[in-house]
Image (cartoon, rainbow, N blue to C red):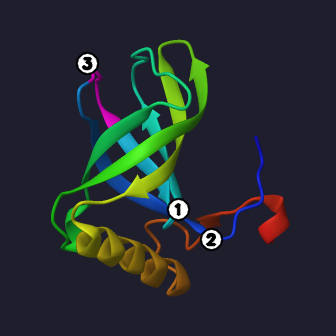
Amino acid sequence: MFEQRNHIRFKALAKVRILDTNLGEALLSDLSITGCKVECTSYAGFELKKQYKLEIIPESDADIGVFELQVESMWIETADYSCEIGFSIIGSPKGKLFERYVDYLSWRYFHGSSMTGGSASESPAEK
């Protein structure tokens, strides 16, 4: 599952709604300009290489509005009644909000916020 990434994945605390699914709660656990990982409390029959729309609701500290991402599922891991999904980002209709959120996560990472421990998700090739 490890891949060589060209961009750091920053830890995130945003809520996620996967539009057009009957999904319970979901959390955006990491994000870069090219991809993200979503943790779900239920499994809703996700398919690989399928496109989805995510509604991202950033944490209040970010002071950034809700935005959507158009994504494609790249990998899926299931455990009991939950799952993690890795998405490749195709685009964002409100691109400026998406960019501001990535900038916020980057700032938080490089200034060592205690909320995330100041770390990002990286593949071994990036370290």
Numbered disc 1: secondary structure:
loop
Which of 48 and 67 lies nearest the eye of the viewer? 48
Q: Is residue 55 magenta?
A: no
Q: Provide residue 41's location: percent of width, then percent of height.
A: 39, 25
Q: Amino acid at mark 3?
A: Asn
Number of other residues with Cα within 10 Å of mark 1, as a class: few under 14, some 14 to 19, many 20 or more: some
- Element under disc 2: loop
Neighbours of disc 2 within 10 Å: few (<14), some (14-19), many (20+): some
- Point out the tag, 3 or 1, that comes first from the N-terminus: 3
Residue designated by label 1: 34
The answer to whether mark 2 and mark 1 are in CB contact below 8 A is yes
Q: Which residue is mark 3?
A: 22
Residue 3 position in % (x across, y down): 76, 52
Callout 2 amino acid: His
Task: In the rendered view, tell whether residue 22 sits above or below residue 93.
Answer: above
Magenta segment, prevailing SS (helix, strand or loop): loop
Q: Residue at x 24, y 33 (%)?
A: 19
Q: Residue at left 83%, top 61%?
A: 124
Indicate the position of residue 70 as horizontal and vertical percent values: 35, 48
* Magenta-highlighted residues: 21-26
Which residue is found at the position 37% from the left and 43% from the top?
A: 27
Disc nearer the start of the sequence (2/1): 2
Q: Where residue 13 sits in the image (x, y, percent)?
A: 37, 56
Q: CA distance from mark 2 to mark 3?
A: 31 Å
Amino acid type, callout 1: Thr
Pick the front one: 62 or 54: 54
Q: Is residue 83 left or right of residue 12?
A: right
Identify the residue shown where x is 17% and y is 58%. Answer: 66
Classify residue 70 as left or right of residue 72.
left
Q: Quadrant of the N terminus?
A: top right
Q: Residue beneath label 2, please?
A: 7
Residue that lies at the very extreme toward the right in this rendered image: 125
